[in-house]
Image: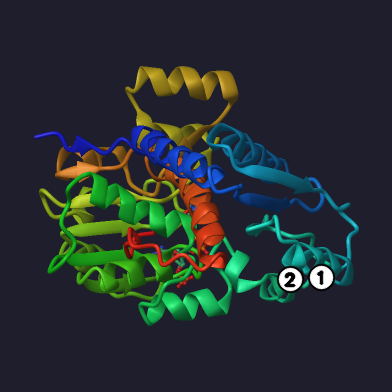
Amino acid sequence: MAARILDGTKMAAEIRAEVAAEVKAMAASGVRPGLAVVLAGHNPASEVYVRGKVKSCEEVGIYSEKHTPAESVTTAELLALVADLNQREEIDGILVQLPLPPQVDAKKVLLAVDPAKDVDGFHPMNVGYLSTQRLGLVPCTPAGVMEILKRSGIPVAGQEAVVVGRSDIVGKPVAMLLLNGNATVTVCHSKTRDLPGVCRRADILVAAIGRAGMITQDYVKPGATVIDVGMNRVSDRAEFDRLFAGNKKREEMFLSKSSTLAGDVHPEVAEVAGAITPVPGGVGPLTIAMLMANTVKAAKLRRGARLPEFSQAR
Ligand code: NDP
């Protein structure tokens, strides 16, 4: 039986509507959440992401501003910008778009962001809050993964979860959120022995690898939930055929744009999984929606709100 498709675009729209309602309610008490995005240099992919983030802010009523230092910016200049944003009252969230130009000490810059305004959730303080189950800011993509599970009614507690990938921005925080949700979690990486065998144990399989279509049917237990975080641009014809042969719609897209976006999960997995996120239209749209949710959360936390509605996923 074909897997249930978990529609991230629809869920992201729901979250944006909820965030917009919260922003409206906050306006009644004179508060408008604000997000500052720092985009250094000219990375075309980053420019697209930042445009999406700013547009999303407009949609939900969050104040946003964009800072665009030149490609030649120094670490000291970025630190000065971050220090200024840290102390500005009307800015609740600071997002430093990665990657930064090579001459910049990115770790130093990220460490300088006030943890209370760290809407990406990358600051070690927030990483520590997550791992000790304290209230903090959770990275957007991992939080989005948990929202998909929650909104799809897929239980986490007691389930076997396998995460492939151990990056600081996706794999590790996803594993921590699943653990906090009482799953039994296994984290895999490039040195894992018998990866297909380990993955086949999973009731929930999360792929955050960065390799197009690596997860094939023999990695998946029939009926498992498969969450595909991967976003890989495929421009090679043979690779396209391995993944999408016979898919006319994809082929049209591939021919017109000379490339297409593929996840880490091979499309054939939809024939054995119980539920699966598509790429595009799965985890991707949730990332920006969770950034909006995080900015509102930061605005509330900074004003001492106790956030009774807080759940681990957020
Ligand atoms: P990283 O490159 O930082 O991490 C990849 C992880 O996958 C590493 O832990 C690596 O293992 C592991 N890995 C690589 N090859 C293999 C293999 N053959 N077998 C087992 N494990 C392997 O990537 P990110 O975590 O930043 O991103 C992962 C994917 O998610 C990418 O496609 C990225 O584009 C996408 N992404 C999507 C987002 C969204 O909004 N949807 C947001 C962020 C990322 P090791 O540690 O041993 O090297």
Element under disc 2: helix
Q: Where is residue 184 in the image (x, y as percent from the top left)?
A: 19, 73
Residues at marks 1 and 2 touching, judged by CB atoms closer than 8 Å: yes
Label annotation for residue 109: 2
| Residue at 33%, 74% in the rendered image | 192
Left or right side of 57 for 314 = left
Q: Can residue 100 be seen in this view?
A: yes
Q: How far apart are marks 1 and 2 (CA)?
A: 6 Å
Label annotation for residue 260: none
* Kind of residue indicated by mark 2: Val
Q: Position of residue 177 (x, y in %)?
A: 33, 68
Q: Can residue 165 be seen in this view?
A: no
Element under disc 1: helix
Q: Position of residue 136 (x, y in %)?
A: 47, 70
Residue on which disc 1 sits: 79
Left or right side of 95 for 236 = left
Q: Which of 107 and 202 is in front in this view?
A: 107
